Amino acid sequence: MLVVTTMAILMNSIDRLILPTLMPAIMEEFNLTTIEAGFLNSLSFIGTFLGALILGFFSDYIGSGYKRCYSWVIAVAIEIGAGVATAFCKTLGAFQALRIVMGFGSGGSEPINVALIGEWWQKENRGFAIGLHHTGFPLGQFVGPVLIGGVIALTASWRDVFLFIPLLGVPIIIIQLIIATPKKQKKVYDWIKDNGMTVPIDETPVAKPTFKETLFSGLNCLKNRNCLLAIILFFGFIWAEMGIATFLTVHLTQEVGLDLATAAVISGASGLTGWIGQIFWGHYSDMKGRKICLGVIIVGWIAAAIACNFIVSVATGWIILVGWGLFRNSPFPVIYAFLIDSAPKAAASGMGLMIGIALGSAGFLVAPIAGWIIADFGFTTHYMVITAALLLSCIPLFLMKETVKQVA
C-alpha cells in the first residue's frame, strides 16, 4: 500500500507539473500573456477545489480502510482520462475545460490517497509513513520534467506529453485493486497488534453512517481549531509552492536564456533532494512534534524563496533548486499527519476540506496574481511577495495546539 500510494502521489506530482513545465510552448501556441497563462493554470485548481470536497466526502461515505480503494480508483481514472483527452483538444476552450476535469481527479485522489496510507500504518509511525509516501511529489518533480523533456526531444510536440504521461496511472490502479482487500487489511492490523502498537482505525463494528452524517462529520472539522489553522497554514505553503513552480520554466527561459528542454530538466532539480526532506521531516515530527518541525521548514522555505532571485545560470539553478528540495514538499505530509491526529473520524473529508479550500483557492489565485506581478514588477518582486506569504504563515503555526503527546 505504501508503494502504491507513493506511485499515485508521483503521478499527481507529474500531472501538476505538465502545464507549468510546458507553459512557454502553450503560451506561444495560444498566444497568451503571462497573466492569461496564470488564469489557464488556475482552472486546474477550480477542479481541485471541487474534487477534493466532493470525492473526499464520498470516500468517507463509502468507508475507510480497504473500502477507500473504490473511491480512489474513480478519482485516479478521471485524472488519467482528462490528461489523455488534452492531447487531442484543438481549441483553447477545450483545453480550459479539460484542465478543470483533470484538477477534479487529482484534487479528489490526494485526500483519499493520504487517508489510505494513514489507515494502513500504526499510529506511532503515522508521520513517517505519510512523509515517505509523499516522496512521490519530489520524485515526480525531478522525474516528471525529465520525462517531459524527453518526450519533447523525441516528438517535438507538447501535446504528446499529455498523451503518454498520464497513462502511468493505469498499472497503479490495477495493483491497488489487488492489494486493497479485507484479508490483507486484517493481516496488517494483526501484525500491528502483535507488535504492541496502535491500529489506525477503531475496529469496533458500527452502523454505516448516512450520507448526511458523513457530510456533517466532515464539516465539523471546520469547528476544530487545529483544522482551521491547518487550512490557513496549508494555504500559505501552497501559495509559495505554486508561486515558484508555475513560472519557474518561464524564469529559466526568459531571464536565464535556456532552451525549454534544458529549463524543464533544471526545474525538477528539487526532486533530487526532496525525498530526503519528506522522510526526515515526517519522522522528525513523530519524535519532536508537528509544530517545531513546521517552524524549521518555514525557515528553510524562506531562505529558498529569497535565493531564487540569484538563479542566473545553469549552475546556480541546480544549486539553489536542489537546496529548495530539502524543504519544498516537506510541510504537506506533516500538516496531513497533524490533521489526521486532530480529526481521525473524518480523514478524507477533513483533508478534502483542507486541500479543496487551501489548495483550490491558493492555486486559483496565485498564478494570475504572480503573472501580473512578474509582468509589471519583475521576478525579484515576485519572490519577495512569496517570502511575505511564508512569514505570515508563522501566525497560524504559533496558534496551533501540538498533537504529538510524547515529545522526545
Image (cartoon, rainbow, N blue to C red):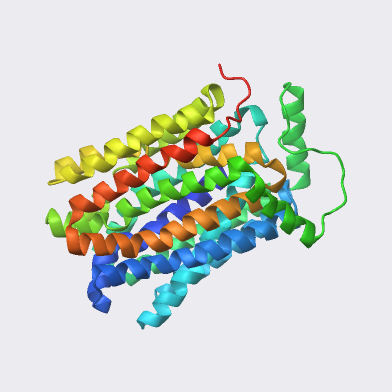
Question: Residue 185: x and y, percent?
Answer: 74, 41
Residue 393 in view (yes/no): yes
Is 299 rendered above or below residue 29? Answer: above
* Location of residue 387 by image quarter: top left
Foreground residue, 133 or 114? 114
Question: Residue 90: x and y, percent?
Answer: 36, 83
Instruction: Residue at the far top: name it.
Output: 408
Foreground residue, 211 or 181? 211
Foreground residue, 65 or 299? 299
Residue 170 horizontal side relative to residue 157, left or right: right
* Location of residue 299 by image quarter: top left
Is 283 rendered above or below residue 379? Answer: above
The quarter of the rendered structure image containing the N terminus is: top right
Is 266 rendered above or below residue 163? Answer: above
Residue located at (67% from left, 42% from top): 343
The quarter of the rendered structure image containing the C terminus is: top right
Residue located at (57% from left, 19% from top): 407
Residue 375 horizontal side relative to residue 12, left or right: left
Question: Residue 234: x and y, percent?
Answer: 48, 46
Residue located at (18% from left, 50% from top): 380
Is 368 rendered above or below residue 331? Answer: below
Residue 278 horizontal side relative to residue 240, left or right: right
